[in-house]
Amino acid sequence: MKFNQLPEFEKDLKSLLKKYRTLQEDLEEVKTILKKRPEVRPPFRFEISNLQLETCVIKVKKIACRSLKGKGIQSGLRLIYAYFKNEQKITFIELYHKNDKENEDKQRILSNFK
Protein backbone atom coordinates (compact mmCIF):
# COMPACT_ATOMS: atom_id res chain seq x y z
CA MET A 1 0.00 0.00 0.00
CA LYS A 2 1.34 3.42 -0.98
CA PHE A 3 0.47 6.53 1.01
CA ASN A 4 0.56 10.13 -0.11
CA GLN A 5 -1.09 13.32 1.04
CA LEU A 6 -2.43 16.55 -0.36
CA PRO A 7 -0.56 19.78 0.45
CA GLU A 8 -3.65 20.92 2.38
CA PHE A 9 -3.42 17.79 4.52
CA GLU A 10 0.18 18.62 5.35
CA LYS A 11 -0.95 22.05 6.57
CA ASP A 12 -3.70 20.45 8.67
CA LEU A 13 -1.19 18.06 10.21
CA LYS A 14 1.36 20.77 10.93
CA SER A 15 -1.27 22.89 12.66
CA LEU A 16 -2.61 19.99 14.75
CA LEU A 17 0.89 18.85 15.74
CA LYS A 18 1.19 22.04 17.80
CA LYS A 19 -1.72 20.87 19.97
CA TYR A 20 -1.22 17.10 19.79
CA ARG A 21 2.48 16.23 19.97
CA THR A 22 2.00 12.47 19.42
CA LEU A 23 -0.15 12.88 16.32
CA GLN A 24 2.60 11.93 13.84
CA GLU A 25 3.21 8.64 15.67
CA ASP A 26 -0.53 8.07 16.02
CA LEU A 27 -0.91 8.48 12.25
CA GLU A 28 1.76 5.84 11.68
CA GLU A 29 -0.40 3.41 13.67
CA VAL A 30 -3.41 4.37 11.54
CA LYS A 31 -1.35 3.65 8.42
CA THR A 32 -0.46 0.20 9.77
CA ILE A 33 -4.16 -0.56 10.20
CA LEU A 34 -5.07 0.86 6.78
CA LYS A 35 -2.44 -1.31 5.08
CA LYS A 36 -4.34 -4.38 6.26
CA ARG A 37 -7.94 -3.10 5.96
CA PRO A 38 -8.28 0.12 3.95
CA GLU A 39 -11.95 -0.29 3.03
CA VAL A 40 -15.09 1.03 4.74
CA ARG A 41 -15.59 -0.56 8.16
CA PRO A 42 -18.38 0.84 10.37
CA PRO A 43 -18.40 2.07 13.11
CA PHE A 44 -14.83 3.24 12.52
CA ARG A 45 -14.82 4.20 8.84
CA PHE A 46 -17.63 5.43 6.61
CA GLU A 47 -17.77 6.25 2.91
CA ILE A 48 -18.68 9.87 2.27
CA SER A 49 -21.69 9.77 -0.02
CA ASN A 50 -23.22 12.30 -2.45
CA LEU A 51 -19.86 13.28 -3.94
CA GLN A 52 -20.54 11.73 -7.36
CA LEU A 53 -16.94 10.56 -7.66
CA GLU A 54 -15.54 7.26 -8.88
CA THR A 55 -12.97 7.40 -6.10
CA CYS A 56 -13.94 5.93 -2.74
CA VAL A 57 -13.56 8.70 -0.14
CA ILE A 58 -13.63 7.48 3.45
CA LYS A 59 -13.98 9.27 6.79
CA VAL A 60 -12.29 7.75 9.84
CA LYS A 61 -14.10 8.74 13.02
CA LYS A 62 -12.25 6.70 15.62
CA ILE A 63 -8.57 7.65 15.90
CA ALA A 64 -6.67 7.08 19.12
CA CYS A 65 -4.41 9.98 20.06
CA ARG A 66 -2.06 9.57 22.99
CA SER A 67 -1.88 13.35 23.46
CA LEU A 68 -5.53 13.26 24.50
CA LYS A 69 -5.10 11.16 27.62
CA GLY A 70 -8.15 9.24 28.79
CA LYS A 71 -9.96 9.67 25.48
CA GLY A 72 -8.72 6.59 23.57
CA ILE A 73 -10.51 6.30 20.24
CA GLN A 74 -12.99 8.93 21.41
CA SER A 75 -10.37 11.62 20.78
CA GLY A 76 -12.53 13.51 18.30
CA LEU A 77 -9.95 13.48 15.52
CA ARG A 78 -11.24 12.89 12.00
CA LEU A 79 -9.26 11.68 8.99
CA ILE A 80 -10.52 11.84 5.40
CA TYR A 81 -8.78 9.79 2.71
CA ALA A 82 -9.27 8.54 -0.83
CA TYR A 83 -8.76 4.82 -1.42
CA PHE A 84 -7.71 3.62 -4.86
CA LYS A 85 -8.24 -0.13 -4.68
CA ASN A 86 -6.76 -1.07 -8.08
CA GLU A 87 -3.63 0.97 -7.50
CA GLN A 88 -3.32 -0.02 -3.81
CA LYS A 89 -2.92 3.64 -2.91
CA ILE A 90 -4.32 5.92 -0.21
CA THR A 91 -4.27 9.70 -0.41
CA PHE A 92 -4.82 11.60 2.82
CA ILE A 93 -7.12 14.56 2.17
CA GLU A 94 -7.98 16.17 5.48
CA LEU A 95 -7.33 15.90 9.20
CA TYR A 96 -9.26 17.87 11.81
CA HIS A 97 -10.70 17.80 15.32
CA LYS A 98 -14.48 17.66 15.54
CA ASN A 99 -14.54 20.64 17.94
CA ASP A 100 -12.77 22.80 15.35
CA LYS A 101 -14.91 21.81 12.41
CA GLU A 102 -18.27 20.08 12.04
CA ASN A 103 -17.80 18.25 8.73
CA GLU A 104 -15.24 17.48 6.06
CA ASP A 105 -14.38 20.04 3.38
CA LYS A 106 -16.31 18.65 0.41
CA GLN A 107 -14.97 21.40 -1.82
CA ARG A 108 -11.41 20.23 -1.12
CA ILE A 109 -12.39 16.67 -2.01
CA LEU A 110 -14.16 17.65 -5.22
CA SER A 111 -11.43 20.03 -6.39
CA ASN A 112 -8.76 17.33 -6.03
CA PHE A 113 -10.62 14.26 -7.29
CA LYS A 114 -13.14 15.44 -9.90
Image: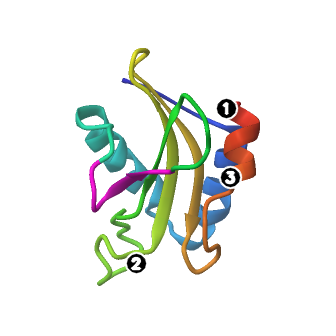
In contact (CB < 8 Å): disc 1 and disc 3: no
Reading the chain from its start, which is encountered first: label 1 or label 2? Answer: 2
Which of the two marks, 1 or 2, is nearer to us in this view?
1
Whether 59 is drawn above or below 81: the answer is: below
Residue drawn at (58%, 73%) of the image? 19
Residue drawn at (68%, 56%) of the image? 105
Whether 86 is drawn above or below 69: the answer is: above
Residue drawn at (67%, 62%) of the image? 15
Q: Amino acid at mark 1?
A: Phe
Which of the two marks, 3 or 2, is nearer to us in this view?
3
In contact (CB < 8 Å): disc 1 and disc 2: no
Give, as a single range, the part of the protein colored magenta.
41-48
- Label annotation for residue 68: 2
Q: Is residue 87 left or right of residue 50?
A: left
Per the model, the C-alpha gap separating discs 1 and 2 is 32 Å
- Label annotation for residue 106: 3
SS class of the residue under badge 2? loop
Q: Amino acid at mark 2?
A: Leu
What secondary structure characterizes most of the magenta part?
A: loop
